Amino acid sequence: MKEQLTKIKLRDWTETKAHSSWQIFKIMAEFVQGFETLAKIGPCISIFGSARTQPGHKYYELTVEIARRLVEEGFGVITGGGPGIMEAGNKGANLAGGISVGLNIDLPFEQHSNPYIARDKTLNFDYFFVRKVMFTKYSQGFIMMPGGWGTMDEFFEVATLIQTRKFTATPMICMGSTYWNGLFNWMREAMLEGEGNISPGDLELIKIFDTADEVVAYIREFYTHNKLQPNF
């Protein structure tokens, strides 16, 4: 019985390995499509945040305003392409007549394309890691609105890439001081002062703002001294 079970497991494992080899082509296709599409769109800002935030909520409306103002400054907007904050970002860009990009992902809940993405700038992904490469390679700034686990994943991914200089210095902004201050206090007290797991300058890489005016002023000032270019 044990030998039979082992044979079944080995057979299943062999079939899984064969399937994994073919996955490489699907992954390559997502990279190629993403690179070819996003390389043509010009400078953009990525906006992250919760898919659950509804129209009328203060952070939804703030995101619309930020996206609109960024377009007026000459930037396009990239979001995850779904509802909530993502929809708000694409809506603001769309209302201002700017570039509105959506990097969608196939999920069992919450995720569906919002109606404010330009038809030729909607990309669909099966793999989170490919999608995150697209966010990070072509964005000239990152705005973190309040969100859940997905937003935190993206927050720490981007913060790590900036901290380790895996791409050039890039504006990273967290919107909503009441939402983010607790996390930053913990990072300062536990990660920095308590255990020394980060350096004092690391937290200075990220700005916390509450208004669209602050965002626009910071990004405008940043790019008076830095080039607009892909991050790597």
Image (cartoon, rainbow, N blue to C red):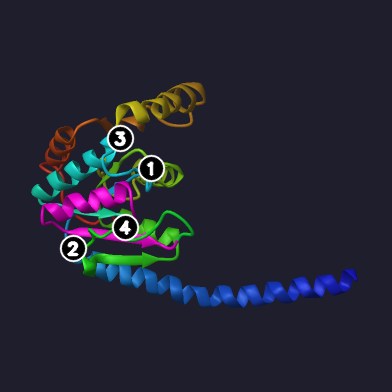
Estimate the spatial distance between the alpha carbons at disc 2 and disc 4, rounded to whole Å: 16 Å
Q: How far separated are the C-alphas under marks 4 and 3?
A: 24 Å
Amino acid at dot 1 = Phe
Q: Quarter of the image holding residue 27?
A: bottom left
Element type at mark 1: helix
Q: Amino acid at mark 3?
A: Ile
Dot placed on the residue nearer the N-terminal end, 3 or 2: 2
Label 4 or label 3, whichever lies nearer to me, is: 4
Dot 4 amino acid type: Gly
Residue range corresponding to the magenta coloring: 81-106
Residue 155: assigned label: 1
Q: Which residue is mark 2?
A: 41
* Residue at which label 4 appears: 81
Residue situated in front as seen by the camera: 42 or 71: 71
Asked if the magenta segment contains residue 93, the reply would be: yes
Q: Is residue 231 above or below residue 205?
A: below
